[in-house]
Image (tube, rainbow, N blue to C red):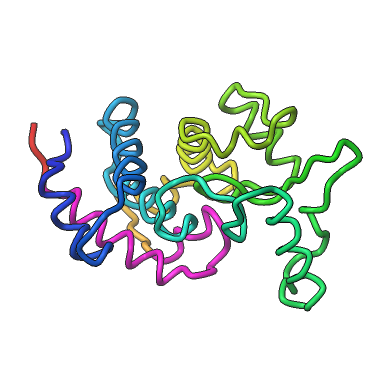
Amino acid sequence: MSINRNFFFDHILDSLFKGSLRQSQLAGIEAILDKWEKESPKDDDRWLAYMLATAHHETGHTMQPVRETFATTDDEAIRRLEKAWRAGKLTWVKTPYWRPDAEGKSWYGRGFVQLTHKDNYVKLGHAIKADLVSEPDKVMELNTALAIMFVGMRNGLFTSHKLADYFNDATEDWVKARKIINGLESANLVAGYTKAYYAAISYTVG
């Protein structure tokens, strides 16, 4: 089944983007849809809706790979995270993972799903057959970020929870699916985005 993109974009314009999409937002969404239709056309459309909703939330609606804190440079991301840490705003963080290591590399969040910690760069890099350790900023490249999101959410590589745990023939849990990425942080908000995307996907052709 292919997605009726005219219906899809008409629907999300009103429900999720207040009537207008920037070219960069359009390009990001199209890239996600293209990858899905090429690689996963027979999979559960709720999986696609949840990936779109996750990207929507994690990127601040930009639908492009972003740095944690939405900084435009590594140095700025590190500075913002350090400032928040010292102000006691990151109470859930046990180790300041953004601080540069001995090689000067920082493992703060990047991409569509905010990949953090060196171990995760190693694991996801192996999964998509890319060296993310030598060049962590590759996660900011659209195709790399897409590959990480798809394989990570399908295979449970971020938190051990995966899409099939929450959307299958017997289960539909829009809220707890947030555990795929980040516990239940903003779970209801992301669930709302997912339902809007799913409504847009559900009118199909082909």
Q: Residue at x 62, y 46 (%)?
A: 115
Which residue is pictured at 46% across the width and 68% down the height?
187
Picture quadrant where residue 137 is located: top right
Residue positioned 16% across, 57% down in the render: 11
Relative to 126, 37 lies left or right: left
In the rendered picture of this protein, how many numbered marks are placed on residues?
0
Residue range in magenta is 175-203
State the image quarter where residue 94 is shown. bottom right
Q: Residue 205 location in percent, x, y? A: 8, 37
Question: 144 above or below 57?
Answer: above
Determine whether, in the image, residue 135 is placed left or right of residue 163: right
Q: Does residue 83 belong to the magenta stretch?
A: no
Tell which of 188 and 155 is nearer to you: 188
Report the side of 69 relative to 45 (left or right): right
Instruction: Return the residue found at the far top.
Output: 129
Horizontal and vertical percent position of residue 18:
24, 67
User: Of 49 and 64, which appears nearest the observer?
Assistant: 64
Picture layout, residue 165 above or below residue 80: above
Observer-nearest residue: 19 or 148? 19
Seen in the picture, residue 184 relative to 134 is either above or below; the reply is below
Horizontal and vertical percent position of residue 87? 78, 78
Question: Does the stretch in magenta take in 197?
Answer: yes
In the rendered image, which quarter contains the C terminus? top left
Seen at 39% across and 48% down, the residue is 51
Q: Quadrant of the N terminus?
A: top left
Q: Main secondary structure of the magenta part?
A: helix
Question: Picture coordinates of residue 81 (x, y %)?
Answer: 72, 63
